[in-house]
């Protein structure tokens, strides 16, 4: 125990209480928001979607390699319950192992308009964005969804995206929700994706601070073209960070779908979870450093343990135990309300997640490089002038 004057111990407990209150408030806001229609703060929630009824949609899916759930996620693309949509699949390499599976899918669903575009356009260091550019250019419709290959689309996927489009929208997104974990570290990944990252995404949007998420993005093509087109998203190493800044610069908002879409996880190794979370943390630190800095306080374990060591009294220990039980209980309750994955190992997964968070946060400040699909990338932010507000930025 660290001996501190009584005033110091009280100050430590007060700071811990603030962190607990902030996190409980974010969980409450997310619980109220998820499952309800997105709304601009200047419009009533009962207002219908501003998306034009029945408008055709282009769905662009960049693909690379075979994954555990590739067949299921690809098949879902062809089973969307929407009367007018086209599918555009983008592959950088003609020898990609997913190509035979995609060919079989397209042959089995001739009634769904679909195209394959081979070869990317290297506009920058983001391989996914490079892979999407030609698909975006080829899209025939004014409404375009960019969807990652590992998003499991429900039949009403397009309708859910459209329903979140409000009069003030510049972009509609969905954060990924981890589902179907097959081992403990996949459960840890669920703990990161669901009641932590998705929770803060929805809490932020409810407060008017919507951030783009690259997993599923619904764009109005004329709007993005007026801001420089898809190539303007190369202004940041992460296309979702560039999208957030572009939409805000245009005086619009990023809105989220009412209920986020699943990403089946399968088996995960600790090294995979670590590398993915460090990569995302470094990207957040570079693109939004003022928002990233407080992330050291978003996990329960560090503030509760440190405060317990400082305070030291039996009363303080009991208070901290109760605060921790309330915090983690609220996370489990949010998962239950939203219908997300839960299991007897969930509490252990939450504890492991929070034990990793300080190291991930520190690692994000230590380096400005990541490895993404085998590509070493410098993630230092670019000159803000790279993100224009008109066609000249293309």
Image: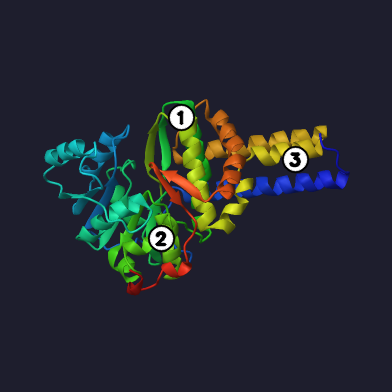
Q: Position of residue 213 (x, y in %)?
A: 42, 52
Q: Looking at the figure, which quarter contains the N terminus?
A: top right
Residue at 24% over, 55% down:
135
Q: Earlier in the sequence, mark 3 or mark 1?
A: 1
362 up-or-down from 57: above or below: above
Report the residue at 86% width, 47% height from top: 7
Q: Which residue is mark 2?
A: 243
> Which residue is identified by label 3?
307
Of labels 2 and 1, earlier in sequence is: 2
Q: Residues within 10 Å of mark 2 (few under 14, many from 20)?
A: many
Q: Secondary structure at mark 3?
A: helix
Give the image location of residue 175, x and y in percent: 42, 48
Query: Is the residue marked by circle 1 packed among few (<14), some (14-19), or many (20+) residues within 10 Å?
Result: few
Work out how far the residue at label 2 is from the one at label 1, CA to CA, in angstroms: 31 Å
- Picture quarter containing residue 390? bottom left
Q: Say which of 187 and 381 sits in front.
A: 381
In the depicted view, which residue is nearer to us: 185 or 362? 362
Q: Is residue 43 visible?
A: no
Residue at image point 60% right, 49% down: 25
| Residue 236 in sight from this viewpoint | yes
Q: Which residue is mark 1?
A: 269
Residues at marks 3 and 1, CA–CA distance in whole angstroms = 31 Å
Q: CA distance from mark 2 to mark 3?
A: 39 Å
Point out the residue furthest to the right here: 5
């Amino acid at each position: 125990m660290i001996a501190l004057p009584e005033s110091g111990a009280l100050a430590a407990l007060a700071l811990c209480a603030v962190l607990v209150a902030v996190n409980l408030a974010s969980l409450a806001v997310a619980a109220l928001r998820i499952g309800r229609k997105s709304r601009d703060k200047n419009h009533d929630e009962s207002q219908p979607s501003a998306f034009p009824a029945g408008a055709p949609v282009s769905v662009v899916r960049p693909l690379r390699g075979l994954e555990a759930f590739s067949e299921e996620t690809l098949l879902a693309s062809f089973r969307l319950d929407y009367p007018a949509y086209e599918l555009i699949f983008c592959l950088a390499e003609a020898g990609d192992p997913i190509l035979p599976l995609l060919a079989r899918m397209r042959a089995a669903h001739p009634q769904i308009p679909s195209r394959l575009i081979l070869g990317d356009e290297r506009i920058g260091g983001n391989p996914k964005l490079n892979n999407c550019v030609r698909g975006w250019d080829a899209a025939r419709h004014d409404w375009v969804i960019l969807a990652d290959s590992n998003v499991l689309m429900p039949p009403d996927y397009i309708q859910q995206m459209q329903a979140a489009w409000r009069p003030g929208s510049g972009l509609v997104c969905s954060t990924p929700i981890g589902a179907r974990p097959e081992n403990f570290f996949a459960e840890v990944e669920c703990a990161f994706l669901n009641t932590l990252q998705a929770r803060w995404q929805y809490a932020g949007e409810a407060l008017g601070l919507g951030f783009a998420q690259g997993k599923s993005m619904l764009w109005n093509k004329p709007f993005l073209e007026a801001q420089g087109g898809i190539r303007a998203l190369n202004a940041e190493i992460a296309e979702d960070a560039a999208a957030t800044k572009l939409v805000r610069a245009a005086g619009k908002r990023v809105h989220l779908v009412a209920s986020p879409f699943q990403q089946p996880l399968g088996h995960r190794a600790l090294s995979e979870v670590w590398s993915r979370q460090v990569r995302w943390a470094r990207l957040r630190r570079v693109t939004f450093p003022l928002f990233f800095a407080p992330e050291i306080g978003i996990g329960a374990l560090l503030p509760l343990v440190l405060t317990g060591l400082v305070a030291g009294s039996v009363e303080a220990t009991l208070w901290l135990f109760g605060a921790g039980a309330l915090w983690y209980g609220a996370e489990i309750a949010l998962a239950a309300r939203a219908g997300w994955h839960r299991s007897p190992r969930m509490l252990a997964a939450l504890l492991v997640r929070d034990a990793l968070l300080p190291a991930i946060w520190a690692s994000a400040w230590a380096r400005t490089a990541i490895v993404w699909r085998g590509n070493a990338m410098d993630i230092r932010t670019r000159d803000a002038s790279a993100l224009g507000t008109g066609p000249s930025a293309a």
